[in-house]
Amino acid sequence: MKAYTLIFCFIFILLSGTTNGETRNIIISSNPAYPPYHYCDEAEGDAVLYGASMMLLDKIKPQNVKIIYNYYPWKRVLREAELGNIQLVTPLRKNTERENYLKFTNYPAFENPIVVFYRKDKPINFNKMEDLKQYKGGVSLSLGDVFGGGVDEYINRNLRVETAANMDRNFNKLLKGRIDYFITGLYVGRHAINNSAEFKAALTWSGNYVNNDFTYFSFSKNDHLDDMISYFDSNLKKLWDIDRNAGFLEDALTESSSRQNNAGCK
């Protein structure tokens, strides 16, 4: 009986530390230039993290948790999390390598559909990856990022693609007819199009997805925050059942388009 009492008290203390009591600091970082999901903006002086991820985080974290943002380039974010210098990483895709040093929530934060962007005057009827073989495409070089679901491997083996340093360069190549299509995330692509009258007038995207993966909040395994993960999961499930958190993404698209500097911090 005493053993059960001790276990109950231990669990109670854990949960109390998560939801009540003194302020608890959690160090967070992210891909600093991935709007509307998350992006660093230093227009007001300090580097601040914005986007759908931060909107969602505000709804699911315990009230006594204070989020402290540390800015790093994206690939270094993953390394710092592996070392335990970052406790929480904004939503990203799961893969085997990342699961070696990150513990992911069970419930997803967002969908992250991948689509084909093309010119309105040169439409592409996209239903499956094989449909792209006759065209010349583009992808971005984004260190530390992947499409997932076997898409990267298929592109490397079967498609004629050019790489460019970032999304805007790929969209400009698409406008100039140097490539026929550009594969990227639906929401990040929509953000770029919304911020350019030229892109908005000339470009559109496929209704069918190349891939539709999920992204998850994750915690460094060097910090034993299982109580925090359980708390996140409880709230994530409630919100996910409403609209799969698509409302946060739509709100963040509006927010990111209205900000002066949302391409990252230096």
Image (spheres, rainbow, N blue to C red):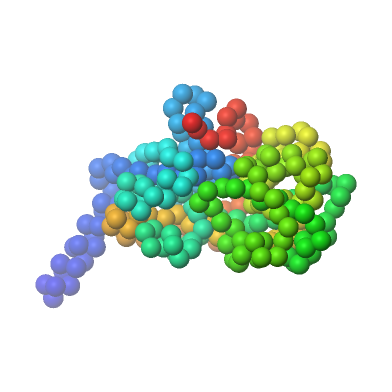
Q: Residue 219: where, in percent of width, then height? A: 37, 54
- Residue 234 point in image, percent of width and height: 42, 60
The furthest residue to the bottom: 1
Q: Residue furthest left?
A: 2
Quarter of the rendering occupied by the N terminus: bottom left
Image x and y of residue 28, in percent? 39, 44
- The extreme right residue here reads 121
Question: What is the total number of numbered labels drawn onto the structure image?
Answer: 0
Please name whichever residue, 143 or 78, is drawn nearer the observer in this view of the structure: 143
**Could you say where residue 187 lies in the image, as x and y percent from the top left?**
64, 48
- Between residue 16 and residue 46, name the one nearer to us: 46
Q: Is residue 204 visible?
A: no
Q: On the rendered structure, is 92 left or right of 249? A: left
The residue shown at (64%, 61%) is: 156
Residue 144 in view here: yes
Find residue 22 and report its image quarter: top left
State the residue at coordinates (71%, 54%): 161
**Vertical comparison of 182 with 51: above or below:** below
Q: Residue at x 39, y 38 (%)?
A: 70
Q: Residue at x 65, y 44 (%)?
A: 164
